Amino acid sequence: MNDTQNLNNNSNQNKNMNKNPHKKKQHTTLPKDHPRYDSLTYRHKIIQGMNDLVVAEAGLIAHGRGECFDYILGEKTNESAHQALKTAVAALLLAKKPVISVNGNVAALIPEQLVQLSQEINAPLEINLFYRKKGRIKAIQNYLEDAGAKKILGLDESKMVQIEELSSNRRLVDPHGIKIADVVLVPLEDGDRTEALKQLGKTVIAIDLNPLSRTSLYADITIVDNVIRTIPLMIQYAQELKDHSEERLEKLVQTFNNRRNIQNCLDLIIQYIKEQKRSLQNSKKPTMH
Ligand code: ATP
Ligand code: MG
């Protein structure tokens, strides 16, 4: 396996194979010199996650929507996102009861980094699903435990409590987690639930590549970036900010303006598209990334 990666053999998640009866094997070989190797690798993680029951079918579509925005953001973490994620880490370090909400997509994409971030900022992971299906919570639990998670919330549906602001089974949260949390990190959340969390008085930190989604607009701090890049950067910022005084962290949070942050991200998209257009007009090849 030199210039290709067999995703079936290499994937860390394949350790779960024996634990999940729904697991289907996937045989896909990607050439490492493929210009979109990284993107394809994460696509395959999502597909593998779906085969393992971790990712909902609609999760594939959500991933595609995210990829589209990533494309027109140049597939890199922009300055505004850096500022937002640094502020987010400060808010999480200042929080009394921070929680990281986990859905199928993030569990499939970056389980180890989620576990590491949870340890760095001392915030538990809570499995919180939009699309509930028998066996999905267990499948996500397996992924997270294989990645080193010791304590996971949101496992026992019979012990979950309801948040009034939402209808149906989407309103269930863990009484020891999101229910009592003051700051909630929601990578890839749905707009309705973000709004409900806001109505409950939580500080919401969202990671969402679409700066115009309802989640992005409702959140207190919106990190417009790919969760794949964001979570590792949050780990780095957590290590850097951990020793800072509360005053310094509070200053970061207080001076942050989310409207301005979202406007900056929209400006970056406009700028990126204009640059691509200009390079076409000058009959150069568009910048490859
Ligand atoms: P909303 O409900 O907030 O208005 P939506 O209905 O457009 O948003 P959902 O399917 O509810 O979208 O949520 C998925 C969101 O996650 C999308 O906005 C998509 O851009 C974003 N997303 C998908 N994959 C990633 C990723 N890897 N990193 C960051 N964001 C992502
Ligand atoms: Mg939605």
Image (tube, rainbow, N blue to C red):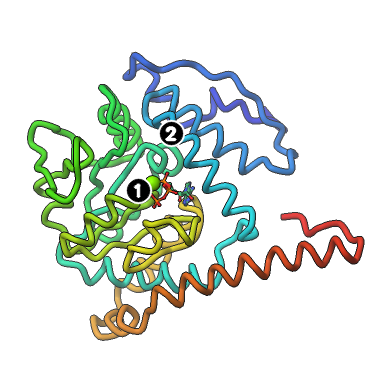
In the picture shown, does residue 286 fall above or below 109? Answer: below
In the rendered structure, find residue 58 and report the number of the disc placed on it: 2
How many marks on residues? 2
Image quadrant containing the C terminus = bottom right
Residue lying farthest to the right in this orientation: 283
Residue 109 appears anywhere in the view: yes
Q: Amino acid at mark 2?
A: Ala
Tell me which residue sits at (39%, 44%) in the image. Answer: 112
**In this picture, residue 186 sits left or right of residue 162:** right
Tell me which residue sits at (30%, 27%) in the image. Answer: 136
The residue to which callout 1 is attached is 190
Q: Secondary structure at mark 2?
A: helix
Q: Position of residue 21 (x, y in %)?
A: 34, 14
Which one is in front, 18 or 140?
Answer: 140
Q: Amino acid at mark 1?
A: Asp
In the picture shown, does residue 287 fall above or below 39? Answer: below
Tell me the CA gap for discs 2 and 1: 12 Å
Say which quarter of the image contains residue 76: bottom right
Say which quarter of the image contains residue 55: top left
Queried on whether the Cβ of the residue with tag 2 lies below 8 angstroms from ligand 1, the answer reads: yes
Q: Secondary structure at mark 1?
A: loop
Queried on whether the Cβ of the residue with tag 1 lies below 8 angstroms from ligand 1, the answer reads: yes
Which one is in front, 108 or 163?
Answer: 163
